[in-house]
Image (spheres, rainbow, N blue to C red):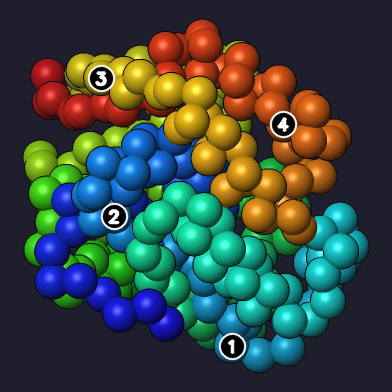
Amino acid sequence: MTELASFYDAIYLSPHLDDAALSCGGQIAQRTRSGQRVLIVTVMAGDPQQDVENEYIRSLHERWALGRDAAAQRRNEDIAACAVLGADFLHWPLPDCIYRLHPVDGRPLYISDNDIFGDVHPAEQPFVEQIAAWLKTLPAHGRCYAPLTVGHHVDHLLVTEAAQRAFGAALYFYEDYPYAQQPGKLSAVLDAAPTQWTPTVVSLTEVDLAAKIEAILAFRSQLSTFFTDRADLERQVRGYAASVGGERLWRKHQG
């Protein structure tokens, strides 16, 4: 585990072990190259609390080409990606939603794509306060960034709800990539009443984009989920960056 600094210019909250690199890798590389301290906190980075296995997990592990120690291998990927970006990392012990079980009957809570992109299971609401309490222990920082929740993944929803409780109006939001490039996904969040949003675009240089691409490539197990190969990854990442002018951030204003 990396030794944390007493102050960070920016902290990025990443539900999973690739979200910050996918969504904010360019700006993170830009910040660290200019001498700023950046911390990436992955909330759902823990091992399963017990030997959980079902058809959904098996299908994902097969796609990822990972075995039973998938979480540990993914943490190693994140360490490599953070080294590319020049950022410190912090891995928290909550497991990915696919491994979480109902606290009463022990049944898996999320066993399909429809489940993980649906609503947070009512049994998991206590996690919001737990994550919020963890967030309040983070080092002092200039800005904190959380997912905008584009794509409606349950882990992104949990992290962002907790972040809003912990940091309130001081929080900044990043577009969850690659969900943000899918038609209608971004507008579904931005158009939700009564919230008003103000965007800020972070312009990226070729050096920034190259670092972002290399960081994403470090997550070898996850590439097949979104991309066919490196060329497809570069095409998509560069294409979205060109369409928005870099990476876009948002502030929330209650209407």
**Residue 39 in sight:** yes
**What's the residue at 49%, 60% (across, down)?**
83
Spatial CA distance of label 2 from label 1 is: 30 Å
Give the labeled residue for mark 2: 38
Mark 4 or 1, nearer chain start: 1
Question: Where 246 falls versus 53 (above or below)?
Answer: above
Instruction: Find out whether the residues at labels 2 and 1 contact each other: C-beta distance under 8 Å.
Output: no
**What's the residue at 13%, 64% (across, down)?**
7
The location of residue 70, given as percent across then percent down, is 72, 74
Spatial CA distance of label 4 from label 1 is: 33 Å
The location of residue 208, given as percent across then percent down, is 46, 32
Is residue 52 found left or right of 216 in the rendered image?
right
Q: Residues within 10 Å of mark 4 (few under 14, many from 20)?
A: some
Mark 4 or 3, nearer chain start: 3
Q: Is 167 or 193 nearer to us in this picture?
A: 167
Question: Where 53 falls versus 202 (above or below)?
Answer: below
Picture quadrant of residue 172: top left
Q: Residues within 10 Å of mark 2 (few under 14, many from 20)?
A: many
The location of residue 64, given as percent across then percent down, is 81, 59
Picture quadrant of residue 145: top left
**What's the residue at 79%, 81% (across, down)?**
68
Q: Which mark is residue 200?
A: 3
Residue type (three-letter) at the residue carrying disc 2: Val
Spatial CA distance of label 3 from label 1 is: 40 Å
Give the labeled residue for mark 1: 49
Residue type (three-letter) at the residue carrying disc 4: Leu
Instruction: Find out whether the residues at labels 4 and 2 contact each other: C-beta distance under 8 Å.
Output: no
Mark 4 or 2, nearer chain start: 2
Spatial CA distance of label 2 from label 3 is: 19 Å
